[in-house]
Image (cartoon, helix red, strand yellow):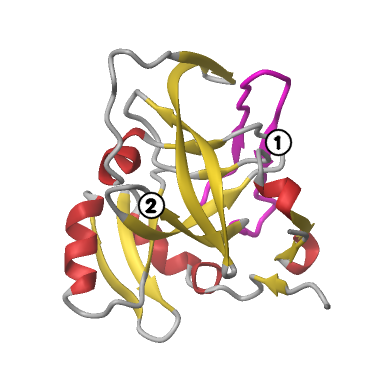
């Protein structure tokens, strides 16, 4: 059986970068057919607006730093560095992922990070998925270029290109940037992932 290979070339986000500059700091809901469906500062409200229009949509947070050179360093247990650079042309290395908790299911666009041990889930996104900060849970420390941060280890059911698996995530306990970062843990064992920056393409090849 030939493995399924999926590419994100010419995704809606990368085709509409200029438009998205207007929505910095907001969540958006979109699809390839209708384009931008809803936007706002709170994910739950954007979802409600989108679902009143269609059940075919993906959510994404337009960072307040969107369109600028960015560098992230996320460290869980080993050294890891993740960098996005802007050399006159901005490209978002993103992919659509379905995340499901016991409380909710969301289709979201995430940043792909080959330098992060874990998948990083922002605080508010975790709350929207029904995560709770249990007092008995062990808090862990992570380290990045901007200092340390505290997180809890959680688990989601994740679906990429029709393949579903359990995914451990680091749920950040501080409010901050709302980028969801898809790291190496589990994902890079199940998929061969190829970055072709010159072609502005990410290729996912299922290994199983």
Number of labels in the image equals 2
What stretch of residues is rendered in magenta? Answer: 67-92
> Disc 1 and disc 2: Cα gap in Å?
21 Å
Q: Position of residue 22 (x, y in %)?
A: 34, 60
Determine which residue is flagged by label 1.
115
- Left or right of 74 in this view: 33: left
Q: Position of residue 188 (x, y in %)?
A: 72, 47
In the rendered image, the residue lying farthest to the right is: 2
Position of residue 143 relative to residue 33, above or below, is above
Q: Position of residue 8 (x, y in %)?
A: 64, 70
Q: Which quadrant would the N terminus be assigned to in this image? A: bottom right
Residue 90, picture quadrant? bottom right
Position of residue 63 relative to residue 149, above or below, is below
Position of residue 100 relative to residue 132, above or below, is below
- Left or right of 190 in this view: 146: left
Q: Residue at x 38, y 44 (%)?
A: 64
Return the residue nearer the eye: 176 or 77.
77
Q: Which quadrant would the C terminus be assigned to in this image? A: bottom right
């Amino acid at each position: 059986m030939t493995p399924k290979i999926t590419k994100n070339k010419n995704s809606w986000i990368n085709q509409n970068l200029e438009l998205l500059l207007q929505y910095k700091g907001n969540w958006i809901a979109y699809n390839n057919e209708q384009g931008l469906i809803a936007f706002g500062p709170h994910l739950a409200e954007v979802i409600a607006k989108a679902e009143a229009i269609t059940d075919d949509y993906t959510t994404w947070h337009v960072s307040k730093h969107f369109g600028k050179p960015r560098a992230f360093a996320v460290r869980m247990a080993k050294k890891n560095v993740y960098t996005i650079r802007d050399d006159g042309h901005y490209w978002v290395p993103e992919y659509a992922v379905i995340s499901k908790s016991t409380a909710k299911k969301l289709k979201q666009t995430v940043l792909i990070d080959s330098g992060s041990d874990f998948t990083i889930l922002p605080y508010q996104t975790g709350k929207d998925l029904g995560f709770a900060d249990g007092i008995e849970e062990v808090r862990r420390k992570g380290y990045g270029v901007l200092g340390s941060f505290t997180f809890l280890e959680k688990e989601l059911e994740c679906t990429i290109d029709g393949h579903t698996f359990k995914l451990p995530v680091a749920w950040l306990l501080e409010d901050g940037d709302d980028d969801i970062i898809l790291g190496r843990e589990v994902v890079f064992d199940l998929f061969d992932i190829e970055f072709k920056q010159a072609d502005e393409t990410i290729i996912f090849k299922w290994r199983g």
